[in-house]
Amino acid sequence: MSPGDAGDQWEPPDQLKQFRETRDKLIERLEQQTDAGAVNVNEMVRLYSREYDQPILTLMEDMQTQATVYYNVFEDLKKGSVSEDSAAVRLNSEFRQVSQSLFSPS
């Protein structure tokens, strides 16, 4: 089966899978702290330092992504274009789409 055949699905290499899993865990920790009302930046930098050569830049990228997603959902709620029931689903979906696009091959 060639790469263009129907039903052929690209599988990321194990290294990319591991990268995504690690990043997802860090993002989840960031979300937990945000939900609690305060982000312990020192702790987050320490956690990111264990995994990345540029921990502050990577943390800032994740924080920017999260802020953008929340802002977009907030704006949709203000416009009334998203019901409150679907806001959480949209928030999760949009965040995952944005974060996946950061890690997908060009």
Image (cartoon, helix red, strand yellow):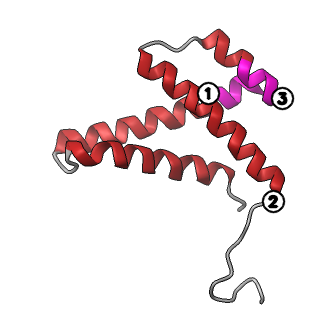
Number of numbered callouts drawn: 3
First reached walking from the N terminus: tag 1 or tag 3: 3
Identify the residue position indicated by label 2 in the image.
13
- Position of 71 with respect to 103 (left or right) is left
Q: Residue at x 56, y 32 (%)?
A: 28
The answer to which image quadrant residue 91 occupies is top left
- Stretch of the chain drawn in magenta: 47-61
Does 58 sit above or below residue 15?
Answer: above
Q: Residue at x 63, y 84 (%)?
A: 7
Instruction: Kindly report the distance in space between the C-alpha atoms of the residues bearing marks 1 and 3.
Output: 14 Å
Nearer the observer, 65 or 29: 29
Question: Quick one: SS at disc 1?
Answer: helix
First reached walking from the N terminus: tag 1 or tag 2: 2
The reply to whether the C-beta atoms of the residues labelled 1 and 3 are less than 8 Å apart is: no
Q: Main secondary structure of the magenta part?
A: helix
Viewer-nearest of discs 1 and 2: 2
Where residue 85 appears, x then y in whole percent?
23, 45
Residue 65 lies in the magenta stretch: no
Question: Quick one: SS at disc 3?
Answer: loop
Where residue 106 appears, x then y in whole percent?
71, 62
Where residue 52 appears, x then y in whole percent?
80, 30
Instruction: Kindly report the distance in space between the C-alpha atoms of the residues bearing marks 2 and 3.
Output: 21 Å
The reply to whether the C-beta atoms of the residues labelled 1 and 2 are less than 8 Å apart is: no
Instruction: Kindly report the distance in space between the C-alpha atoms of the residues bearing marks 1 and 2.
Output: 26 Å
Q: Residue at x 71, y 71 (%)?
A: 10
Identify the residue position indicated by label 1 in the image.
60
In the rendered structure, which amino acid carries the disc numbered 1? Answer: Met
Nearer the observer, 61 or 27: 27
Identify the residue position indicated by label 3 in the image.
53
Where residue 46 appears, x then y in whole percent?
73, 15
Q: Residues within 10 Å of mark 1 (few under 14, many from 20)?
A: few
